[in-house]
Image (cartoon, rainbow, N blue to C red):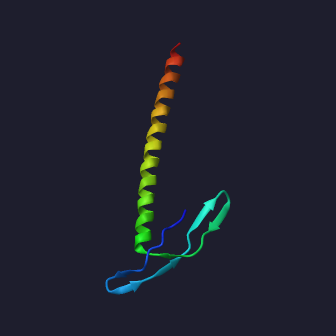
Amino acid sequence: GEIPTHPEEDVEGGEVQELGKIVTTTGDVDVVEEETHFTSASAQILIGEIMVCNRELEKIKENINNVEKRLNNIIDVLGRI
């Protein structure tokens, strides 16, 4: 994914400028994107995205558990016939 670039931020009186490479995986191929200025603002955006993904994964896990329970109930009912 793309990381928005932000101007360097003044942190505790010192200029902070980090250079990073963003690596994403597509199938078995690693794609290294163009180098970007990586700042604490960029990190906060990524952390927010991770939190959103984690919430979505939790919902998916919950749905899977509900489906498994329904299937087990159906199998139990069929076993009594």
Residue under the point 64% across and 59% down: 26
The part of the image, by quadrant, that contains residue 50 is bottom left
The correct choice, above or below, for 36 with respect to 14 in the image is above
The correct choice, above or below, for 26 with respect to 40 in the image is above
Image check: 12 left or right of 60? left
Image quadrant where one finds the N terminus: bottom right
Residue under the point 56% across and 73% down: 21
| Residue 69, horizontal then vertical, whole percent | 46, 30
In the depicted view, which residue is nearer to us: 47 or 65?
A: 47
Image check: 69 left or right of 24? left
| Residue 38, horizontal then vertical, whole percent | 48, 75
Residue farthest to the top, as pictured: 81
The correct choice, above or below, for 64 with respect to 13 in the image is above
Residue under the point 45% across and 82% down: 17
Residue farthest to the bottom, as pictured: 14
| Residue 53, horizontal then vertical, whole percent | 46, 53
Residue under the point 46% across and 38% down: 63
In the depicted view, which residue is nearer to us: 65 or 53?
A: 53
Task: Tally the marks.
Answer: 0
Residue farthest to the right, as pictured: 28
| Residue 25, horizontal then vertical, whole percent | 61, 61
Residue farthest to the left, as pictured: 12
